Amino acid sequence: MKGKRYSEEQIVRILKEVEIGKPVAEVCREHGVSEQSVYRWRTKFGGMDVSDVQRLKQLEDENSRLKRLVANQALDIELLKEINSKKW
């Protein structure tokens, strides 16, 4: 699978060009992306500033870290329950 070509900040700048009135086809041609990519980006990043996107990235990272933490704790709890249920 191909890696990301544009950072979130670059995507927001591309979307700003579309918002100020440039035709989508022209913006796509200038930046070498498909129109579908621009519309997909618009659903995710539409109306955001660069600072908003950076904050979104921080929150996504924190969320994934917390999910891993909860999963590890659930495994530990399950292991302790299994150990305590055995008769010695």
Image (cartoon, grey):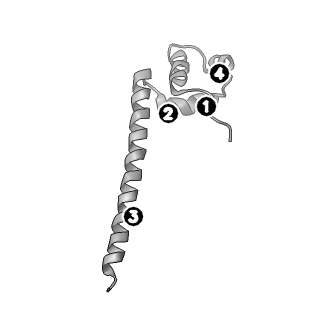
* The C terminus, quarter of image: bottom left
Helix, strand or loop under label 2: helix
Helix, strand or loop under label 4: helix
Of marks 4 and 3, the one in the foreground: 3
Residue 85 lies in what quarter of the image?
A: bottom left
Tags 3 and 1 touching, CB below 8 Å? no
User: What amino acid is found at the position of numbered circle 2 in the picture?
Assistant: Thr
Disc nearer the start of the sequence (3/1): 1
Tag 1 residue: 37
Residue occupying the point 54% across, 24% down: 11
Tag 3 residue: 75
Residue 49: where, in percent of width, then height?
42, 21
Real-space Cα distance between discs 4 and 3? 47 Å
Disc nearer the start of the sequence (1/2): 1
Residue occupying the point 59% across, 26% down: 6
Real-space Cα distance between discs 2 and 4? 16 Å
Disc nearer the start of the sequence (3/2): 2
User: What amino acid is found at the position of numbered circle 4 in the picture?
Assistant: Cys
Tag 2 residue: 43
Crowd rating for badge 1 (residues with CA inside 10 Å; few <14, some 14–19, many 20+): few
Tag 4 residue: 28
